[in-house]
Image (spheres, helix red, strand yellow):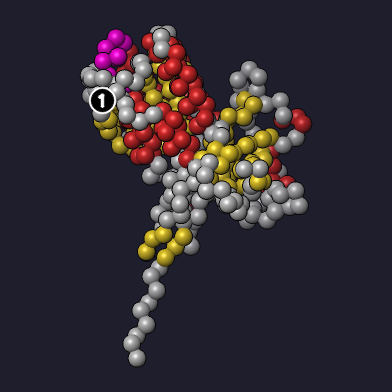
Amino acid sequence: MVAQESEPNIRVVVDMVQLNVAVTDNKGNYITGLRPSDFAIVEDNIPQKLATFGEGNEPAYRVADTASPDGRTSAQAAGQQHPADQKLGDDPPQTLGSMVSGANVFLLFDTSNYMYRGFVFAQDAIADFVRSLESADKVAFYSYSRDLSRSATLTPDRAQVLRGVRATVAGDDAALYNCLLLTIKDAAHFTGRKVVVVFSNGPDNSSMVPPEDVAELAQSTGTAIYMISTQLAKLEPVSTAVFERMTAATGGKAYFAKNWRDEQRAFASIRDDLAHLYSLSYYPQANPNRGWRGITVKLVGEHLKKYHIRTRNGYRPQPNRFSVGSATASASGTVPEQP
């Protein structure tokens, strides 16, 4: 008899959708101290069960997966952490525990010929922002003109990032959307909260990639885009509208700075935002739609309906990937489920 070949170790990647959610009042003040039971998530009109929950830069924790009749988990219904839950930060590396503790922040700096004026002031504002980030955050620093320069890859080492900032020089035409797309692809390799902060001094004049494709990839990988631009961008209404639409669709913000003080205030606002975001995640319920899926996050309870929510509005799921020996993450703002 011929010995039967052993079957390869094939594991299926299960998508976990991660959301960064800002909750504010009418004056823009952050609402803190909310619980899992205060949030309801719907994808394509299908209620979802919350899998993990966290606030700010604290590690997230698992939410119990037993559902109540109204579709909420038992921890949601009780408004508290289930006794069996644990802090994700206590898990072994490469499990769900590595997902949410701080943020992976990718800085993308415009070094095109639009940036000749105020170049040093922009460097100073970026350097101050890097120094001010929470210790849990990791930072990468990229710059762009016609091409992308990865000056400092993602690292907790602030000195390495600052050296990259100071080494930049102003140069060629601006291919913002090309380089932003490459930055988002880099960010997609990492689990957890992913943020791209763009400092741009003007419109894009040499990209081949349309901004709509960039925005969709950011939404599908769970990457929030924040854009700080100078008043020069306001001279081209199309660029202004694109910046505002792109950031809003991904759960980020757009800022238009009149001077270097406004630039510093914009960076401070982004730092504040990162420190107050809620981190929610869920495994999507059965859904035959392989195209664009809309996401709606709402607050539960009459006393919370007066507040405003900002997060990404959907994603396009990537085909599940199979691997021999190990699982790899798909590119829809997800992490693989461990066997």
Q: Is residue 305 above or below residue 26?
A: below
As for residue 69 lying within the magenta part, the answer is no
Q: Residue at x 30, y 14 (%)?
A: 114
Q: Is residue 25 left or right of residue 180?
A: right
Q: Is residue 321 left or right of residue 277?
A: left
Q: Residue at x 75, y 35 (%)?
A: 301
The magenta span reads 110-120
Q: Is residue 2 above or below residue 311?
A: below
Q: Secondary structure at mark 1?
A: loop
Q: Residue at x 66, y 39 (%)?
A: 39
Name the residue at the bottom extreme. 1
Quadrant of the frame with the N terminus: bottom left
| Label 1: few (<14), some (14–19) or many (≥20) C-alpha neighbours in 10 Å | many
Return the x and y of residue 27 as percentages of the image width and height: 63, 17
Return the x and y of residue 99 as percentages of the image width and height: 47, 46
The amino acid sitting under disc 1 is Arg
Q: Is residue 58 left or right of residue 145?
A: right
Q: Is residue 162 visible?
A: no
Q: Nearer the viewer, residue 313 or 97?
A: 313
Residue carrying label 1: 146
Return the x and y of residue 166 as percentages of the image width and height: 26, 22
Q: Is residue 303 left or right of residue 297?
A: right
In this figure, what is the number of numbered marks? 1
Q: Nearer the viewer, residue 72 or 221?
A: 221
Q: Residue at x 72, y 30 (%)?
A: 304
As for residue 119 lying within the magenta part, the answer is yes
Q: Is residue 206 above or below residue 288?
A: above
Q: Nearer the viewer, residue 278 or 335?
A: 335
Q: Is residue 314 visible?
A: yes
